[in-house]
Image (cartoon, helix red, strand yellow):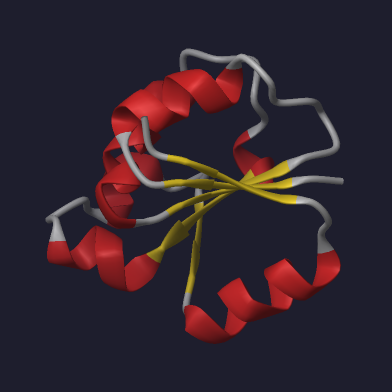
Amino acid sequence: MSLHLVFSPQGMRSCLARWSPDDCLILIGDGVYGANHIEQTIVEASAVAVLDSDAQARGVSGSEHRSLRRIDYMEFVRLTEQHSPIVSWKD
């Protein structure tokens, strides 16, 4: 079970090319803009988390993406402890 850290919309496209159903994605920084593309993919929304502080800083509202789980830094750390390998995507 890989953990994919997505830091940009371009990184989201690269990540999705290598994503598998048992993987988890976290949208971080400008990667939160990639939330707009999740509904158009085969990725289950339950496999995607958005770092809440980054989403708030960029004006990405929760009402637009209710199915995506918002997490704080503590949950982020917990997910990094549970998954291996951890892959970063920025492109």
Q: The C terminus appears in which quarter of the rendering?
A: top left
Q: Nearer the viewer, residue 91 or 50?
A: 91
Residue extending farthest to the front is 91
Which of the pair 51/2 is nearer the observer?
Answer: 2
Q: Residue placed farthest to the bottom in the image?
A: 74
Q: Looking at the picture, does residue 39 appear above or below residue 62?
A: above
Picture coordinates of residue 8, whole percent (x, y)? 32, 38
* Total numbered circles: 0
* Among the 4 quarters of the image, the one containing residue 21: top right
At x 68% / y 20%, what residue is drawn?
A: 18
Where residue 62 appears, as percent x and y from the top left, is 31, 55
Q: Quadrant of residue 20?
A: top right
Q: Is residue 58 found left or right of 1 in the rendered image? A: left
At 49% from the left and 81% from the top, the residue drawn is 73
Q: Nearer the viewer, residue 1 or 85?
A: 85
Question: Which residue does the image show at 41% across and 30% down from the upper left?
Answer: 11
Residue 18 versus residue 51 in the image, above or below: above
Q: What residue do we see at 22% from left, 53% from top?
A: 61
Q: Position of residue 66 (x, y in %)?
A: 43, 48
In this image, 88 relative to 35: left or right?
right
Horizontal side of 3 relative to 60 (left or right) equals right
